[in-house]
Image (spheres, helix red, strand yellow):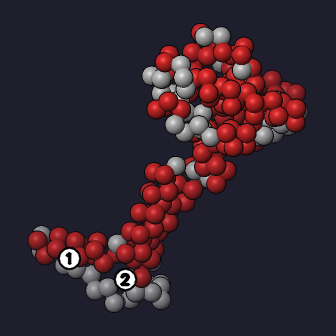
């Protein structure tokens, strides 16, 4: 998430301060290749509607509409991919990473992560999970067999060492996290399938028929 934040910061800085530098590079390029430069203070003429008065200068068009527009689009796409909810979820998930002897382990973040699954962790489970997590981290940090693993999927070693029986609530949380990407991808496939199946020509499908068709399409 640090990379996402730094990327967003750099894009905003380039948007605010990068125009003059870019314009200077354009001047150098035009002089080198004998290209006639535009007068930035002249009224902008839309090449598709030359008789239409735009009311803006050439500089306004290229700086605000084009240059700034590109950075606004990039930031918007970044925010769509990494929304606040998604970013917070990634921060919570990072607490499960076993890299560098579980350096990123964070009890509070893991408890917050478990609270996102109220169907799987009731209030009693959450109390027991707190104890499970404390015992689990103290255990694996002193076990050499866990010292070399670096990814969440490598925590399958829990099963090999039968720790999934010793710490059942932590193992439940781990399974939920591991299947999250698959579940997300399945939901996206379902929505894509609905767009194809539920066309204007089939708009009269009842819910049961639509459900059957979508299942066949997704599982094919």
Q: Is residue 122 left or right of residue 130?
A: right
Q: Is residue 150 above or below residue 64?
A: above
Which residue is rendered at x = 61% and y = 16% of the image?
158
Q: Position of residue 203 (x, y in %)?
A: 81, 39
Q: Is residue 213 above or below residue 19?
A: above
Crowdedness near tag 1: few (<14), some (14–19) or many (≥20) residues, C-alpha within 10 Å: some
Q: Is residue 23 left or right of residue 214?
A: left
Q: Position of residue 6 (x, y in %)?
A: 45, 57
CA gap between label 2 and label 1 equals: 14 Å
Q: Quadrant of residue 181?
A: top right
Q: Position of residue 35 (x, y in %)?
A: 17, 74
Q: Quadrant of residue 152?
A: top right
Q: Which residue is mark 1?
A: 27
Question: Residue 214 has which mark?
Answer: none
Crowdedness near tag 2: few (<14), some (14–19) or many (≥20) residues, C-alpha within 10 Å: some
Q: Nearer the viewer, residue 163 or 206?
A: 163
Q: Quadrant of residue 18?
A: bottom left
Q: Is residue 50 visible?
A: no
Q: Nearer the viewer, residue 18 or 154?
A: 154
Question: Residue 59 has which mark?
Answer: 2
């Amino acid at each position: 998430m640090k990379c996402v934040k730094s990327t967003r910061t750099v894009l905003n800085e380039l948007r605010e301060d990068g125009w003059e530098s870019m314009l200077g590079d354009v001047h150098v390029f035009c002089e080198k290749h004998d290209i006639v430069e535009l007068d930035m203070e002249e009224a902008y003429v839309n090449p598709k509607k030359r008789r239409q008065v735009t009311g803006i200068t050439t500089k306004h068009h290229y700086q605000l509409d084009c240059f700034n527009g590109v950075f606004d689009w990039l930031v918007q796409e970044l925010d769509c991919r990494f929304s606040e909810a998604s970013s917070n979820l990634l921060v919570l998930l990072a607490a499960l990473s076993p890299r560098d002897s579980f350096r990123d382990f964070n009890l509070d973040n893991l408890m917050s992560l478990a609270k996102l699954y109220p169907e799987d962790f009731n209030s009693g489970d959450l109390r027991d999970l707190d104890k499970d997590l404390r015992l689990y981290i103290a255990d694996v940090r002193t076990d050499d067999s866990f010292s070399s693993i670096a990814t969440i999927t490598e925590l399958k070693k829990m099963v090999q060492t039968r720790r999934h029986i010793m710490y059942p609530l932590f193992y439940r949380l781990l399974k939920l996290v591991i299947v999250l990407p698959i579940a997300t991808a399945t939901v996206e496939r379902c929505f894509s399938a609905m767009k194809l199946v539920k066309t204007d020509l089939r708009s009269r499908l009842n819910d049961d028929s639509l459900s059957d068709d979508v299942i066949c399409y997704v599982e094919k």
